[in-house]
Image (tube, rainbow, N blue to C red):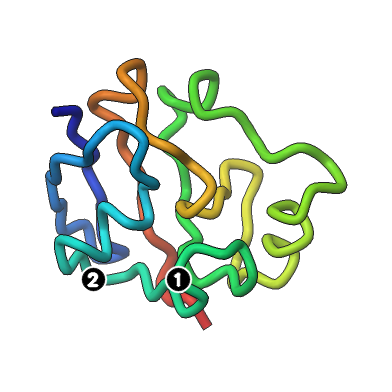
Amino acid sequence: MPEVTYIEFDGTPHRVEVPLGTSVMRGAVDNNVPGIDADCGGECACATCHVYVDAAWLDKVALPEPGSQEAAMLSFAAVAQPDSRLSCQITMREELAGLVVRMPEGQH
């Protein structure tokens, strides 16, 4: 099963197995990873699962499409950056095995 490394704002890493087809958000929530609130439960409606995708993974994860619901939600995210994504919109697949994401200081 592929793994994702979630890195808290303070640098604490959490390496978690995330089943194929499962969102990166769900992997964090199901494994009690702190820093991803997921208030809307993965409906792309709250931006509280905001993460920064490690630079080495940006080409495989891709940025949200301009004008998409995710892009609109990221405009409400705390401290959005060019490498920001909503983890509910990243679905695990084989080529993402080893993915590294970092959490912002807060989700609200």
- Cα distance in 3D space between marks 1 and 2: 15 Å
Residue at left offset 22%, top offset 37%: 19
Q: Are marks 1 and 2 in contact (CB under 8 Å)?
A: no
Task: Indicate the quadrant where residue 56 lies.
Answer: top left
Q: Secondary structure at mark 1?
A: loop
Q: Name the side, left or right, on which 44 lies relative to 23.
A: right
Rendered position, 17 above or below 75: above
Residue at left offset 24%, top offset 39%: 4
Q: Name the side, left or right, on which 92 lies relative to 64.
A: left
Rendered position, 41 above or below 6: below
Question: x%, y% of residue 78?
Answer: 59, 72
Task: Indicate the quadrant where residue 66 lies.
Answer: top right
Q: Residue furthest right?
A: 67
Q: Amino acid at mark 2?
A: Pro
* Mark closer to the observer (1, 2): 1
Question: x%, y% of residue 18?
Answer: 22, 41
Q: Residues within 10 Å of mark 1 (few under 14, many from 20)?
A: some
Residue at left offset 74%, top offset 52%: 71
Question: x%, y% of residue 104?
Answer: 43, 64
Q: Amino acid at mark 1?
A: Gly
Residue underneath mark 1: 41
Residue underneath mark 2: 34
1 or 2: tag closer to the N-terminus: 2
Residue at left offset 64%, top offset 70%: 45
Q: Residue furthest front?
A: 21
